Amino acid sequence: MPRVGIVGVGLIGRAWANVFARAGWSVALWDANPQALAAAPALIRRSLDDLVPHGLVNDAAAAAENLRVGRSLQDTLNGADLVQESGPEQIDIKIAMYRELDSLADPATILASSTSALVASRFTSELPGRVRCLVAHPVNPPHVVPIVELCGAPWTSPDVMVRARQFYESVGQSAVEVRKEIDGFILNRMQSVLLAEAFRLIGEGYVSAADLDKTIKDGLGRRWAFMGPMETIELNAPNGIADYCARYSKMLHGLSESAVTADIWGPENCQRVADSWGERPTADHVLSKSAWRDERLGALAAHLNTAKAYGDE
């Protein structure tokens, strides 16, 4: 049975534990916060139960048996094939944490961070074992959204990248390689541009926040649920992507050149967007709606897992 050490058991760490436990890995949990660590097994079990109706977990009780709480960080790391670190997004904490992980983990253990913005070279450069370190950036919540972006530092071993990809794909994740370091990786950079244009369109009065959401939910999001943008535009011109560019690149350039300006994220425009949305959710509302979102994503994942891809018999 392969082993993973989950270091940090907040929302992302617990979701990762779900992913590995249901795939049959031995999962050791650790967190510097004793209360968070004590609460984690029950919360992970609940998330496993939630996936049973969609067929994403066959036996939640059996999957939960793969979980254990580490007696210490060293105990959590012992024998691990992979460590999935999901700690705070603070560079000083990351540097200290990876110094400790590198000194305690077996030499062959891969050390992966869930960071959403910090490239690995910023917190692994001085480590003796820096060749086994990389970023494995998920999308929240990774137990129902399978993408994971793998981004090594300039010194990360190619063999480590291959092994990491094999590990994540073996537990049902959709792994992509970011071929060289870039802040925010791929998904967040694309998301940031779309959000900037959304904030501009709302802030300048072209559309309400609610109708903007409909445009994505019932338009682009519906189409992109099973085809990416490259596959989509290939179908929008008779002779593929090159033909699409020849037909539409001038128009698209004109539409996109003003998308990101400094004032889009300023307080005045952010307030206009917030006012257009109109809701200021309570903590209970966020918790309840997050559970609803995860359940809907689970249903979508179940559908996409069973739907035939183009070209399949």
Image (cartoon, rainbow, N blue to C red):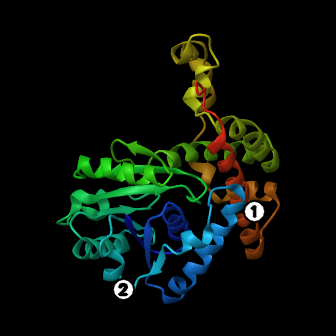
- The reply, left or right, for residue 119 in relation to residue 89 is left
Can the viewer see residue 260? yes
Residue 19 in picture, x, y percent from top left? 52, 61
| Disc 2 residue type (three-letter) | Ser
The residue under the point 39% across, 67% down is: 4
Q: CA distance from mark 2 to mark 1?
A: 34 Å
Closer to us: 202 or 91: 91
Residue under label 1, please give it.
Answer: 292
Q: Callout 2 environment at 10 Å: few (<14), some (14 to 19), or many (20+)?
A: few
Closer to us: 283 or 61: 61
Residue 189 in picture, x, y percent from top left? 50, 46
Residue 63 in picture, x, y percent from top left? 55, 69
Badge 1 marks a residue whose secondary structure is helix
223 vs 116: above or below: above
Residue 229 in picture, x, y percent from top left? 58, 31
Mark closer to the chain start, 2 or 1? 2
The residue under the point 58% across, 21% down is: 234
Residue under label 2, please give it.
Answer: 72
Q: Quadrant of the C terminus?
A: top right
Query: What is the count of numbered marks?
Result: 2
Examine the image and state in which quarter residue 217 appears: top right
- The reply, left or right, for residue 251 in relation to residue 95 is right
Examine the image and state in which quarter residue 266 appears: bottom right
